[in-house]
Amino acid sequence: MDINYVAEGEELRLFFEGHIDSANAKEIEDAIGAIRSAGNYSRIVIDCEKLSYISSAGLRIILRLMKDAVVVSVVNVSPEVYDIFEMTGFTEMVKVSKAFRKVSVDGCELVGRGANGTVYRIDPDTIVKVYENPDSLAEIERERELARKAFVMGIPTAIPYDVVRVDDKYYGSVFELLNAKSLAKLLAGDPGELDNVLDLYVGLLKKIHSTQLKKGEMPDCKTTVLSWVEFLKDYLREDLYTKLYSLVEAVPDDDHLVHGDYHLKNVMLQDGEALLIDMDTLCLGHPVFEFGAIFNAYCGYVELDHESIVDFLGIPYETAAEIWDRTVRMYFGTDDEAFIQRVKDKSKIVGYIRVMRRAIRHGGPGDPEAAAVIENCKKRFDELLPNTDNLEFV
Amino acid sequence: MLITKTRDENKLTVEVSGRIDSMTAPEFEEFLKENLDGVTELTINMASLDYISSAGLRVLLLAQKKMNTQGTMEVLNVNETVGEILDVTGFSDILTIR
């Protein structure tokens, strides 16, 4: 009996097919033995895409492989075969991954297009976000896990259901269909909605920041921002770099949720309730990291090109600047001008780190537009850093 | 969505059928708010529940949080569709499902 396999370095992938029971288990085990003796494999992946049944005799093959102290995992398991693994307790001993459900978006309604994917409606209750990059599986699973954790902590958001294989080519993430409109769209359609939009926007922001998780359950904001600061090292005057690094490093640790990309397009309104979407930037940390990103969304990124905010949020720059200002005032519930100015300046310091990094990565000093942004950030750091002792909101 | 309740002193059994989605979740939330006072054993029977959306799950989460402070909560007779939703969202780990 032949068994299909692929060997790559120390990993051996075995393809289990059809029906495996006492009638053919011995032959299969012998075949595997022959394959293994021809190489030196420390990991065995058993691909069950074409496996329709496995009896206890078949399961014992896997058990014996595990006893040989190789790392065994079982992938691409159909729901029927998964039941067998589960009933026999195998799922607790070895990592068993279900096959991805297959869907086709052929003829489905196109709901929208985003930076890294296209969204289709696949049935009345669900949409699928299809990722253009075929290697996006790890990223999809990371985002799903973050969204799931936030949801379980009570953050109103769409539930990510399963990951699916789309038209045998791409991966997709299935979400519940929201009957909703983004706050950006709402405001673009009716500027008179500004007060209402701000109430919802700041209300949800406070809810996010009051959500506490355990340290390590999500990435730590400060670690990420420190790595961005390090990225700027070769581009900043030494005294500015040192000051910037020590300011970020001194931000107190915090285990509350930060969205990381909180702007009007990422808040959806459904039946009067604000829902948060786009969870790939979720992290834990001090609110100053959130406010840095908020400043960027409305002012920081477009500081040298106010017009471009219209393409991004569909609102004029004046409105965006007003949203930034009022968000700070409403969040802290004060009009104490000196305090508001301090909050804004500290947020800007965090914001410019990201703006400068982005300009370096997309263009660099050789590109006139990016060079202007980089110079502007340096100027801002020069103005702001000497007058700042810490990044806390005090 | 249809909600029926059976109250036996401090035990409350709620049978919810149909769909709990963004349209009906507020009603479910309101119902629980009005009926949980003095309840130490809450049972939610989902035998005839066809679908639950995130809005509905959040109501369950609120109920669970409330019951954590005053008693116990159990979810019964979850069908396959609803069970899958509870699994993928991680709710199976939070709720007591029988």
Image (spheres, coloured by chain):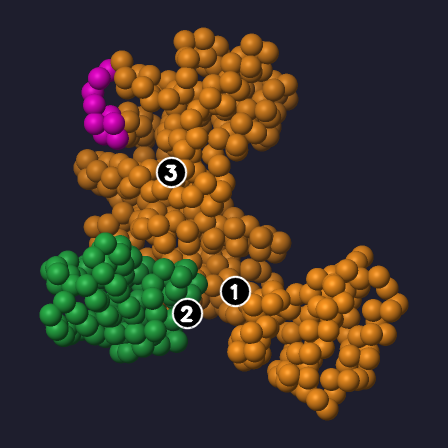
Chain colours: A orange, B green
Residue type pointed to by label 1: Val
Nearer to us in this view, A378 or A340: A340
For mark 3, give the secondary structure: loop
Residue marked by disc 3: A256
Q: Chain of mark 3?
A: A
Both marks 2 and 3 on one chain? no
Residue in view at x 43 percent, y 30 percent: A253
The Cα–Cα distance between marks 3 and 1, rounded to whole angstroms, is 31 Å
Residue marked by disc 2: B84
Q: Quadrant of residue B30?
A: bottom left
Question: Please, is residue A192 above or below residue B16 in the view?
Answer: above
Residue in view at x 25 percent, y 39 percent: A203
The Cα–Cα distance between marks 2 and 1, rounded to whole angstroms, is 15 Å
Q: Earlier in the sequence, mark 3 or mark 1?
A: 1
- Indicate the position of residue A77 as horizontal and vertical percent values: 59, 73
Residue type pointed to by label 2: Glu
Residue marked by disc 1: A164
Q: Residues within 10 Å of mark 3 (few under 14, many from 20)?
A: some
Is residue B23 among what the camera can see?
Answer: no
The Cα–Cα distance between marks 2 and 3, rounded to whole angstroms, is 29 Å
Q: Chain of mark 1?
A: A
Question: Please, is residue A208 above or below residue A305 in the view?
Answer: below
Q: Residues within 10 Å of mark 2 (few under 14, many from 20)?
A: some
The magenta stretch is: A329-337
Q: Magenta stretch containing residue A2, yes or no?
A: no
